[in-house]
Amino acid sequence: MPETKYLIVGCSHAGLAALDAIRLIDADSPVIVVSKEAGLPYSPTSLPYVLSGKADPERIFLRPADYFERSRVQLMTGSAVTALNSKAKSVDLDDGRQIFYDKILLATGARPAVPEIVGLSRAPYLVLRALNDAVTLRDRIKQAGSAIILGAGLIGMHTAENLALAGMEVTVVEARQQVLPDYFDSNAAEIISQVFQNQGIKILLGNAVTHVKSTNNGCAVSLNDGLDLSANILLAATGVQPCWEYINDPTMERDRGILVDDHMRTSLDSVWAAGDLVQARDFFGNGSSYLATLPSAVNQGRVAGEDMAHDPEATAYIGNIPANTYSFFGQWAYSLGHAMIDESGAGYEVNYTYSPTCRRYQKLIFEGDHLIGAMGVNSDLDPGVIFELIQRKVDLANLKEELTVAPQKVPRYLMTKLWR
């Protein structure tokens, strides 16, 4: 019956960041990492490239095969946690084993949130969240000529692009009135949508699916406007939800995610959580928020690992800052911070540069003399620098207008002045 000082459940960005932080302080104490995946850890962001064939499934791993052995870490792959017993400080695995721990990090991430649509559960639909999903979908492409994608979020749009590049006829169905509604405003979304349509991808907006049924060679869907569609492949890409089905303790405080403090501690003793599983403090002071992004997962994992190992230089989590960058058909876009504010007023100042015919868009949002949000499509602004301006709350009293009209000059000046 294994026992360990540190138990990390989940082996993607949050779990690995925590492991690295622990080993910087505590090089020798026992660590066990449990992963339900059969192989080495990988990033879900690489899955569209596996799907397209640009990335080899055997070459997308976040750590080499000998990393865990060199780090004196026991990696248990192909093992799913089925129960957390916080009072006994143990977990149950799906193979009947138990692991006892002193401290545990929950970093089990998220899984696809499959919509409740009549007939969907009986249809041969696919999702794209794990490596096996990408390999299965890639293999199906070889025999399929058409696909319907439910949802125009990042996963749905990435998949639509790669399927179209593979020569398939692709239709994206989105219940809301624009593509990428949780990431971009209507101006940016219109540019992105037009690029996709110019590539032959059909995008049906404001249309909910009412019924799904299997056909001899795929699936058929009915929409609320009466339109019927059919395709060889049906992909559900309508968001994610936390993987926490193994948590039965009613004293675990949860909302949309597991509630954590600024050191990623949960309401249970000796239990930390990080990544797509948690709801953490919002950077802008609006309580807590759920933010399933790679940068937040890495930062939360690092903070949790530092706290678990009693790092004397441990830092508190700065709070969730939305940060998304998106590449599509040779174009690129970003959305950072409070980027969805559209109009000046209520203490906000919004500066636009919008040229849809040139496929260029830039929006900067200020609160007083501080940048709090930015959005762009094919913009000259560097999103990495802009993120730092937001995170560091840099005073831009004399530079706001110049930042808008000289998006390359001002960031370079600030980097030289502040960050060398």
Image (cartoon, rainbow, N blue to C red):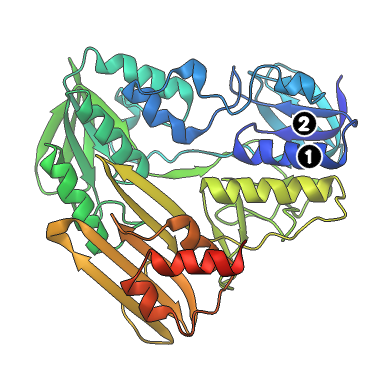
Quadrant of residue 13 within the rendered picture:
top right
Residue 177 visible in image: no
- Residue type at mark 2 is Val
- Residue type at mark 1 is Ile
Q: Tell me the residue that label 2 is attached to.
A: 91
Along the line of sight, the residue nearer the viewer: 111 or 73: 73
In the image, 94: left or right of 282?
Answer: right
Q: Are marks 1 and 2 in contact (CB under 8 Å)?
A: yes
Which residue lies at the image location 33% right of the left edge and 46% below the top edge? 153
Which residue lies at the image location 23% right of the left edge and 63% below the top edge? 187
The percent position of residue 203, horizontal first and vertical second, equals: 16, 44
Compared to residue 18, the image places residue 391 above or below, namely below
The percent position of residue 137, horizontal first and vertical second, equals: 34, 21
Residue 266 visible in image: yes
Compared to residue 126, the image places residue 228 above or below, namely below
Q: CA distance from mark 1 to mark 2?
A: 10 Å
Q: Tell me the residue that label 1 is attached to.
A: 104
Which residue lies at the image location 32% right of the left edge and 14% below the top edge? 139
Compared to residue 385, the image places residue 392 above or below, namely below
